[in-house]
Amino acid sequence: MCKRIREDIAAVRQRDPAARSGFEILLMYAGVHALFWHRPAHWLYRHHCFFLARLISQLTRFFTGIEIHPGAVIGHNVFIDHGSGIVIGETAEVGDGCTLYQGVTLGGTGKDTGKRHPTLGRNVMVGCGAKVLGPVRVGDNCKIAANAVLLHSIDADSTAVGVPARVVRVSNVRLENERLDHVHIPDPIQQELHRAHRQIAELEKRLAALEAELEKEKER
């Protein structure tokens, strides 16, 4: 247990520049507390003490804002940063060295039975607010962007973004058919104004044609 605590503290110190000391991390970091209490809860769950396991997990959720089902499998050197709003489902698996930011959900879709939750490989980074849903597999060293919704498995060394999430990089090489331009993004208000102007111009043409026909009728 002491070895795992030292691993948790080392993971925070490696990946959080705001961490100043191991003592501060041990006392102040909710992610470390959630992982600490998940281990006895998981042990109880594996030994079919389901009520006590869920009791520990729910108390941990109350104090940390992080809900990890006692059935979830969490690897070594995992870093939960900030942690508020994180939900990890019963059959989820989180590999060694993963990083999860606030608001992450490793959940189910409600359509699956048995294995219902995601499996993350080693060194996966899941950005804040991202959702990984269903029994999907995320390969080693993948990155899932903030607020992405991943509904399918992705290979190792991939970067997925968007809703629904799609792979835009593999091994840090941008895919040609998935080039994202975050600078020259069209202005939706301007687009709507252009559309309104086109409609007004069309209506003016039709009105002019009707007025011309009425003038002809009067002349007759």
Image: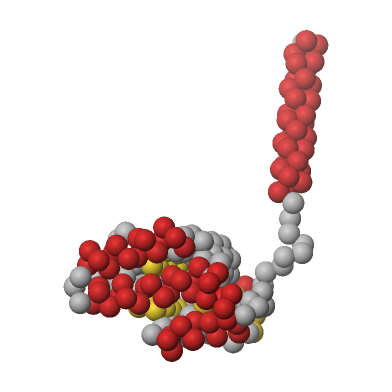
Which residue is pictured at 49% across the width and 86% down the height?
6
Task: Where is residue 184? Give x, y as percent.
Answer: 77, 62
Against 217, is 36 above or below? below
Q: Can residue 101 be seen in this snapshot? A: no
Which residue is pictured at 38% across the width and 67% down the height?
68
208, 216: nearer the viewer? 208
Q: How many marks?
A: 0
User: Is residue 117 found left or right of 17 in the rendered image?
Assistant: left
Task: Where is residue 115? Give x, y as percent.
Answer: 28, 72
The quarter of the displayed image where residue 102 is located: bottom right
Which residue is pictured at 37% across the width and 73% down the height?
38
Query: In this view, which residue lies farthest toward the left?
Result: 48
User: Is residue 50 found left or right of 170 in the rendered image?
Assistant: left
Against 125, is 50 above or below? above
Task: Where is residue 155? Give x, y as percent.
Answer: 47, 83
For the C terminus, the quadrant is: top right
Colour scheme in use: secondary structure
Which residue is pictured at 43% across the width and 74% down the height?
35
Q: Can residue 22 be seen in this snapshot? A: yes
User: Is residue 131 found left or right of 51 in the rendered image?
Assistant: right
Against 207, is 159 above or below? below
72, 168: nearer the viewer? 72
The quarter of the displayed image where residue 201 is located: top right
